[in-house]
Each structure stands twice: as C-alpha cells, then as structure tokens.
Amino acid sequence: MSCNILIGGFVQKRDLESAHRLFDEMPERNVATWNVMVMGLTQFEFNEAGLSLFSRMRGLGFMPDGFTLGSVFKGCAGLKDLNSDWQVHRYVVKSGLELNSVVGNSLAHMYMKSGSLGEGEKVIAAMPITNVVAYNTLINAL
C-alpha cells in the first residue's frame, strides 16, 4: 500500500520516471498499483505507454476495474485510433461490462472523442437504460 501511495505522489508531481522505476521494482502489485500507473500515463498523454501497460496488466492476469477502464478510455480517445477503441470495446463486451451504465457512457465518450460519432451513438443505443449522462455525451459530441 505504501508503494501505491508513493507512486501516486510521484504521478501527482509529474515525476513519471520515478513512479515507473518504483513500479518496476515492486515485488508484488495489485490492481490499484496498475491503476495509478495507467492513470498517470494517460493523464499526461503518454497514451500508447498507458495502453501498453494495460495490455501487460491483463496479460499477467489482473482484472481491470472501472478506474482502469476510465484511464484506458481516456488513452484511446487521446490516440484517436479506432483500432484501439475497437479492441477495448471488445474487451468490455467479453468481460460483460457493456451493461454497466458508467462503462457504457465512458465507452461512447471515447468513440466520440476519437471522431467516431456513429460508433458512440451505437453504444448509447445499445445501453439498457439511457440516462442524462448518455444524452449529454451525445449532445456534447454533436
């Protein structure tokens, strides 16, 4: 836990090099550790590095949570690469998270920020319950 706090402190000070060095030296990591690193990278627009770390996280068997996905969606939107968007979308569907309204809204927002209004609209249309956030996301994109 103390390493996670230290990594978070380095990220807040924009010292990603120290954060990454500590992350790499940690003998054990948990989802919070991965989250703070993925968030830090995407927050400062190191989107490819953040998505690569997310891929590594999944490859090692860690299950991303809503915090992880929020950072991943931000990274994908920053890249404006529909291929990355589709890969993350497939992961969301495969994980059964597409019915979660927060995830669905964030997914739609990612597509729209990437320049694919149509894909974002499809996500909103497929949501079991469309809420104010979904409509605001759509209005903002239009």
Image: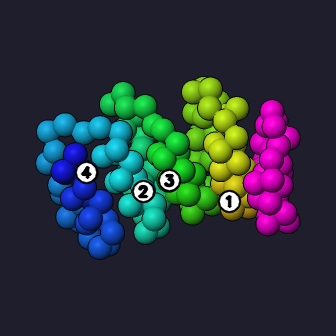
Distance of mark 3 from mark 4, alpha carbons?
17 Å
Identify which residue is drawn at 68% across, 59% down.
114
**Which residue is label 4 attached to?**
4
N-term mark: 4 or 1:
4
Magenta region, main secondary structure: helix
Distance of mark 4 from mark 1, alpha carbons?
31 Å
Frontmost of labels 3 and 4 is: 4
Distance of mark 2 from mark 4, alpha carbons?
12 Å
Distance of mark 2 from mark 3, alpha carbons?
5 Å
Name the residue type under label 3.
Answer: Ser
- On screen, residue 85 above or below 137: above
Within 10 Å of disc 1 (Cα), the crowding (few <14, some 14-19, many 20+) is many
Q: Which of 14 and 59 is in front in this view?
A: 14
Distance of mark 1 from mark 3, alpha carbons?
15 Å
**Which residue is label 3 attached to?**
71
N-term mark: 3 or 4:
4
Determine the secondary structure under disc 4: helix
N-term mark: 2 or 1:
2
Residue stretch rendered in magenta on the structure = 116-142
Task: Point out which mark residue 21 bears.
Answer: none
Identify which residue is drawn at 26% across, 65% down.
9
Within 10 Å of disc 2 (Cα), the crowding (few <14, some 14-19, many 20+) is many
Frontmost of labels 1 and 3 is: 3
Q: Where's residue 53, x and y in %?
A: 37, 47
**Which residue is label 1 attached to?**
114
Determine the secondary structure under disc 2: helix
Name the residue type under label 4.
Answer: Asn
